[in-house]
Image (cartoon, rainbow, N blue to C red):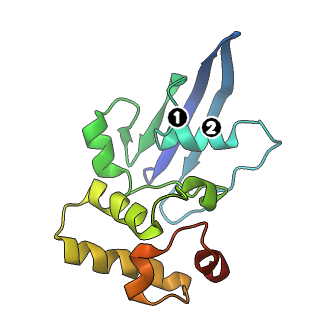
Amino acid sequence: MTRSLLALSDLHVTFSTRRGLVEAVRGVALSLGEGEMLGLVGESGSGKSVTGFAITRLLDAAGRITAGNIQFRGQDITRISGGDFRNLHGAAMAMIFQNPRAALNPIRAVGDQIADAITAHKRMPRMRRARRRWNCCAPCKFAIPKSAWPLIRMNSPAACASA
């Protein structure tokens, strides 16, 4: 039997609110093998996004994993240090947000935000980082010259027209 790439067992996520504790995820269990795809489907507010945020440790400050575990490549990632998780996150796992435009800061250049993510996971010289940033965006087929890339903002007409 092969080991799962990702396995959730009895996952519970609770949020602390002014009105008390709210259990947003109750007992989620799933297993995903290497090369498999999985879609979480459910009503609004059913915990799909919170489950994804828990897996990637992107829960906001009020959210806590209160029970269960999350195994990634056989390692319980709910128990590893922040530094060890940062080495894993972005290199081996990432979250694709439902609305990527809301995930980006409209005040900062898109290229700078991509460079931030690259730098958070791998140190490299500035020119290599700039080349890597461009290569990450090239498949999107932006109709913007490389020289203008650092100037483009998500809320500019050029970025919106070419997105």
Q: Residue furthest right?
A: 43
Q: Say which residue appears at 77% left-offset and 36% top-offset.
A: 45
Q: Residues within 10 Å of mark 2 (few under 14, many from 20)?
A: many
103 sits to left or right of 151: right
Residue at the disc numbered 2: 50
Between the residue at mark 2 and the residue at mark 1, the CA separation in whole angstroms equals 7 Å
- Find residue 63 and report its horizontal and vertical position in percent: 55, 25
Contact (CB < 8 A) between labels 2 and 1?
Answer: yes
Question: Is disc 2 placed on a helix, strand or loop?
Answer: helix
* Nearer to us in this view, 89 or 11: 89
* Residue 95 circle label: none
Residue 91's image quarter? bottom left
Q: Residues within 10 Å of mark 1 (few under 14, many from 20)?
A: some
- Find residue 107 and report its horizontal and vertical position in percent: 51, 58
First in sequence: mark 2 or mark 1?
2
Name which residue type carries label 2.
Val
Q: Say which residue appears at 62% left-offset and 61% top-offset.
A: 101
| Image: 160 above or below 29 | below
- Find residue 139 and report its horizontal and vertical position in percent: 50, 84
* Nearer to us in this view, 34 or 132: 132
Residue at the disc numbered 1: 59
| Image: 17 above or below 43 | above
